[in-house]
Amino acid sequence: MEDLKALTTSVCEVARRAGRYIEEERTKFHTESVERKHAHDYVSYVDKASEKLIVESLKALLPEAGFITEEGTATRHEEEYCWVVDPLDGTTNFIHNYAPYCVSIALCKGKEILMGVVYEVTTGECFYAWKDGGAYCNEKPLKVGRNDINDALLCLQLPYNSEVYRPVAQRLIGHFYGHVASVRMSGSAAMSLCYVAAGRLDGYAEKFIGQWDFMAGACIVKEAGGKVTDYDGDDYFMEGDSVVATNGKIHQELLEGIKASM
């Protein structure tokens, strides 16, 4: 296999190409092209074309790898390596021309995340990390913040599964609102994770999300010195549907707030 650092550099360019495509399509995008996958969960030709571009490029970089992709362009068949791709994370934001939205690409081997790349389309920021290589944004090293819970800026995302999660979200926001610096919702799981890695957020939590939403960002958080688990506090979160990512200092307190809200 190619050196991970060099491979990450190549994947960053793939993400940037997909991002340039998304940026160009946004200038002529019409809401008539939007399809509903589920209630309040949308997809368009832009998601699908971006995924096709990414998959074709990644196959050229690592032909032996399988795929987990949000729009099902490619699949996995017991391959040793696996790409996990979200071609447009934050589709609802994209539809409304509301930042952020991004491209997210991770490479896994078994239970290990080997690399993660997230390209934010509206700012041109490329966040990336590889195993034991650190985390970066446009070549600048990333480190998580050091705020404690009282000064923490939290992202408590609202998933599409509103009927099930609404009471949890209400209790969770109520638990922290007024007791932390503030609470935000970004509309993009991948970007929220990158913001934790960059110290812009101190903690992030979301449930009912797919591997393509969080895999790359989780790698970036961990390489930036942060902590990532599922809602139960399990370090092996990669096959679940919940993620908690923090600067490490506030992780237990965020988990306790989640437990009290479930």
Image: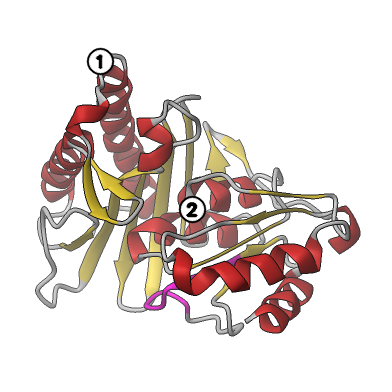
Question: Which range is magenta?
Answer: 237-244
Residue on which disc 2 sits: 189
Q: Position of residue 71 (x, y in %)?
A: 18, 53
- Say which quarter of the image contains residue 66: bottom left
Q: Is residue 227 visible?
A: no
Q: Main secondary structure of the magenta part?
A: loop
Q: Nearer the viewer, residue 159 or 101?
A: 159
Whether 166 is drawn above or below 31: the answer is below
Q: Is residue 9 left or right of residue 151?
A: left
Residue 65: quarter of image: bottom left
Eyeballing the image, is 134 above or below 102? below
Residue 163, numbered circle: none
The residue lying at 20 percent from left, 29 percent from top is 32
Q: Quadrant of the N terminus?
A: bottom left
210 over 229 or under it: above or below = above
Q: Is residue 131 magenta?
A: no
Closer to the chain start, of discs 2 and 1, is 1
Residue at 71% across, 46% down: 199
Q: Secondary structure at mark 2?
A: helix
The tag on residue 28 is: 1
Spatial separation of the CA atoms under disc 2 and disc 1: 25 Å
Give x and y (percent) for residue 126: 46, 35
The three-letter code of the residue at mark 2 reads Ala
The residue mark sitting in front, 2 or 1, is 1
Q: Secondary structure at mark 1?
A: loop
Image location of residue 122, percent across then percent down: 46, 25
